Image (cartoon, rainbow, N blue to C red):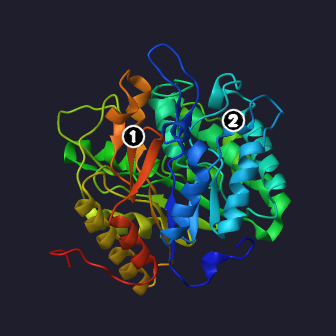
Amino acid sequence: MTGDKWFRDGALHFALGIEDTFVPQGGPGERPIDEYELTEHYRFFSDDLRLAAESGAGMLRWGIPWHRVNPEPGCFDWSWLDAVFARFAELELRPVVDLLHYGTPVWLDRQFANPDYPQRVAEYGVAVAERYADTVTDYTPVNEPMIHALFSGQYAYWPPYLSGAPGLVTMSTQLARGFQLTQRGIAEVLGDRATFVHVDAGMRYDGHESRAAEIEHLREQVWLVEDLATGRGGPEHPLARFLAENGATDDVLEQLRRGAVQPDVVGVNYYPRHSTELLLEGQRHGGGFADPRPVRDDGTAGLEELLRAAAARYGAPVALTETCVTGSVEERAEWLDDSVACIDRLRAEGVDVVAYTWWPLFDMYEWTWRHSENPRADHQLTMGLYSLEETSDGLTRVPTPLVDRFRRHARGIHPTFEGHA
């Protein structure tokens, strides 16, 4: 299952994901968030991986809890991870490994703003690659780096609580450098067997003509960390002045250009009900959970635009690496059908879309849980192929009709619900 360049075989690969947000730092009014604890994946991982395989997925986007695997500087605890990757191999389920899904270990002072962050995250990534070189070859060095940059930089919502444009630029350059060092280190370990899937949030912006300049800035900003990591942050970049005015020195940008890494696959995460934000006349919103902008559901049109843009910008195969809607089973089924049909149309037109990922396999808990005192059930998001139900034995994974529906799509069959063609 590992080592071959699956994205070159001409097929559309169907994948699932397990939500793996980790922000282990707590504080007054803030609970550490670990989605594997919330969904009890640490306990049920063996069955969870089986469910993914039985649902028809050949691949699973799955993240490593850095804060648990690397509990102290230079110290690694592989016990749980060994069992997980052994289970992947047993099931012949291909892991596409998120090395970083938002949080650093608690021992890393100032988190992403720590000057040693790029070296520390690369050290961790290389250690993982060395230990699992025989079984894991597909890596996402950092999931959704632009969301990292916004939430930990501009919005001061997550550690290290930077704010404004300078915070965004600090986060963007730090993440990009860590991204580069991690990918380069893993490539040294795995050589040509390594596959790198770069993944970011498919954010779209529209709105009133009075805010056209702001909208255009945000549309370029969507790609900023990926542009920096891939060496595109030169003087000709549309945001070059913005970077320089907010702390990115010539030396930093030149280092990023020299250290450029490239994706084998560019992944786009797209949620039709949330991915298109609106900037309206006279309204000011900071973005994020604390001050969200209004949104518009642009359906498959938004998905198509983002995938075409990613393919054109980076000249690599593209993948839909996360998608779903939060809603009823019928609403989710409709989006599953419509989004798969969109991918099929793009492929028929020659766009090199190589994977489709429904996210997540089972329900998850909204990030607002971190800033709440309410029980996890109050934050459950109905997104998965499986629902989560509280029982005396823990969270039970309950299949919905979406399981068979996804399986049939993965097999090339186009199912329908009654009344939905």
Local crowd size for mark 1, using a 10 Å CA cut-off: few (<14), some (14–19), many (≥20): few
The quarter holding residue 410 reads: bottom left
Local crowd size for mark 2, using a 10 Å CA cut-off: few (<14), some (14–19), many (≥20): some
Question: Which labelled disc corresponds to residue 201?
Answer: none
CB within 8 Å, label 1 to label 2: no
Disc 1 marks a residue whose amino acid type is: Glu
Disc 2 marks a residue whose amino acid type is: Arg
Question: Which labelled disc corresponds to residue 68?
Answer: 2
Task: Say whether disc 1 or disc 2 marks the residue closer to the N-terminus.
Answer: 2
Picture coordinates of residue 388, whole percent (x, y): 40, 47
Picture coordinates of residue 182, whole percent (x, y): 74, 49
Write the residue at 79% across / 60% down: 187
**Secondary structure beneath disc 1?**
strand
Q: In this view, does 387 lie above or below 113?
A: below
Question: Which labelled disc corresponds to residue 390?
Answer: 1
- Towards the viewer: 315 or 16: 16
Cα distance in 3D space between marks 1 and 2 = 25 Å
